Image: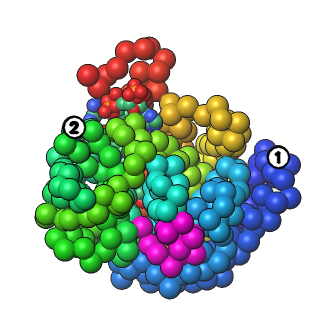
């Protein structure tokens, strides 16, 4: 079994509190003991290990930064470290937690009524209820503001029509946060419950990436939902994008975990693989690759740590998150590639986690805003000129 090793060249542990380290190590143990032994099988079969969801709830991982409603009320560094450890196992596990926490619980907590919060948050925190977040549509990915999904008010109900694409957890969700335009063309969030007539969530099969994660289409055909299922404080695309900031923040930490898994595997391999009578770690070109990986991981760690501080101090801006999402995912992509090179043919073997992580990172590179969209977001913030219009 793969054993997780600390990758902490700049002694970041000195910056974490005892509580943060305890939380990280608890999640690390859970992932090592209960997830790593089954993840390759899940990945090959294209299945998410749903039986672990209650355990995520028990550990206080779901909605962990929310205060009250049976949530743990942790700080952002703790949340980041949790994402790191989950994604060190597999991006699919972190994706599940990101969606449930940042894209379902956060909007209910931030834009919902007290009744909605009381009804949904404690169950979502325990993993008794699963959620998904429907923003992307078949023809509107990077530009969600152009969405076609509509919510038409009819007395005490809204009638929803449209479709959403590439939705994590869609087919296993009990509740979907669906973004749709109302009669005034304002984008709002709606809670659509599983089993509502006209609502279905077929799974998208045959992915080469995030295979241990459920991805689905959401189909809404004259779906009648009571007005109480609208999130009343959600008004405009800005509010959907606010949810993304939370998830993107977690991704910046998560991909460090995936990169650590690839780096540690490559380092151990290089020290024991003998070619030309010597460990390949003795060759200068292999050392250069290992040092590059460590350097990139270390910079990403510092970026996420500072971002976490800014978040907790209320100073984090969307473009701060964009910079870290862009940098850290790109870092994990490159680290995965170099790690695979170092393992030679073994780099493509399922016995090692590298290609699974590499394939996963291709989705992470695209979802929650592509690398280029984040580049342009930072570009807009420094030039004052938008490349989007
Ligand atoms: P734009 O004109 O730039 O902005 C409209 C208003 O929103 C504000 N804003 C934000 N507010 C909070 N957070 C952000 N990140 C924000 N970005 C923009 C902005 O200040 C403005 O406010 P105001 O007060 O002036 O009205 O909007 P735009 O329509 O031009 O779009 C800009 C753009 C391209 C950056 C945005 O659409 C974008 O981020 N596109 C990427 C779409 C995306 O990331 N989709 C993700 C879908 S969910 C997902 O992928 C889940 S994966 C789940 C998993 O982990 O498994
Ligand atoms: P497009 O927007 O069509 O972009 C295609 C290419 O064009 C990209 O390279 C992009 O960078 C480039 N491009 C687009 N516009 C510009 C521009 N203005 N300037 C320069 N280049 C540009 N969405 C959800 O709502 N909920 C989810 O739970 C969810 N989960 C996902 C899970 C997986 C596994 C995947 C793969 C996606 C998921 N998504 C989800 C969707 C994801 O957010 C979108 O795929 C993403 O926002 C990009 O949209 P798109 O795929 O339509 O690409």
Report the residue marked by disc 2.
Answer: 184
The mark nearer the N terminus, 1 or 2, is 1
Ligand 1 closer than 8 Å to label 1 CB = no
Judge whether residue 122 is colored magenta.
yes
Q: Quadrant of the N terminus?
A: bottom right
Q: Counting other residues with Cα less than 10 Å from the Cα at mark 1, is it few (<14), some (14-19), or many (20 or more)?
A: few
Left or right? Give the position of 277 relative to 130: right
Left or right? Give the position of 1 relative to 151: right
Quadrant of residue 144 within the rendered picture? top left
Report the residue marked by disc 1.
Answer: 15
Q: Is residue 110 above or below residue 86?
A: above
Q: Tell me, for residue 3, which label it has, or none.
A: none
Q: Position of residue 169 (x, y in %)?
A: 38, 69
Inspect this view and state whether residue 366 appears.
no
The part of the chain drawn in magenta is: 118-131
- Report the residue at 49% width, 62% height from top: 115
């Amino acid at each position: 079994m793969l054993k997780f090793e600390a990758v902490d060249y700049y002694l970041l542990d000195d910056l974490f509190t005892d509580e943060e380290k305890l939380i990280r190590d608890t999640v690390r143990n859970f992932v090592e003991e209960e997830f790593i032994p089954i993840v390759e099988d899940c990945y090959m079969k294209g299945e998410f290990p749903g039986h672990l969801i209650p355990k995520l709830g028990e550990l206080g991982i779901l909605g962990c930064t929310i205060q009250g409603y049976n949530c743990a009320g942790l700080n952002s560094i703790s949340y980041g470290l949790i994402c790191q450890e989950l994604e060190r196992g597999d991006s699919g596990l972190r994706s599940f937690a990101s969606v449930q926490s940042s894209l379902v619980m956060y909007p209910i907590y931030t834009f919902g009524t007290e009744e909605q919060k009381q009804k949904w948050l404690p169950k979502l925190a325990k993993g008794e209820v699963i959620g998904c977040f429907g923003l992307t549509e078949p023809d509107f990915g990077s530009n969600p503001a152009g969405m076609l999904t509509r919510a038409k008010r009819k007395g005490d109900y809204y009638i929803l029509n449209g479709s959403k694409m590439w939705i994590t957890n869609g087919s296993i969700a009990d509740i979907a946060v669906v973004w749709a335009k109302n009669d005034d063309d304002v984008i709002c969030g709606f809670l659509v419950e599983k089993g509502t007539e006209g609502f279905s969530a077929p799974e998208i099969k045959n992915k080469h990436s995030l295979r241990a994660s459920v991805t689905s289409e959401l189909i809404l055909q004259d779906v009648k939902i009571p007005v109480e299922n609208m999130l009343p404080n959600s008004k405009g695309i800005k509010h959907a994008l606010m949810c993304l900031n939370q998830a993107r923040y977690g991704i910046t930490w998560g991909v460090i975990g995936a990169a650590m898994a690839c780096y540690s595997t490559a380092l151990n391999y290089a020290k024991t693989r003998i070619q030309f009578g010597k460990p390949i770690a003795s060759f200068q070109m292999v050392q250069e690759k290992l040092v590059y990986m460590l350097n990139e991981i270390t910079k990403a760690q510092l970026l996420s740590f500072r971002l976490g501080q800014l978040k907790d101090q209320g100073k984090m801006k969307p473009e701060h998150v964009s910079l870290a999402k862009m940098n850290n995912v790109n870092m994990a992509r490159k680290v995965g590639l170099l790690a695979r090179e170092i393992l030679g043919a073994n780099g493509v073997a399922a016995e090692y986690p590298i290609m699974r992580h590499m394939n996963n990172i291709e989705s992470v590179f695209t979802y929650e805003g592509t690398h280029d969209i984040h580049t342009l977001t930072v570009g807009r913030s420094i030039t004052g000129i938008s490349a989007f219009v």
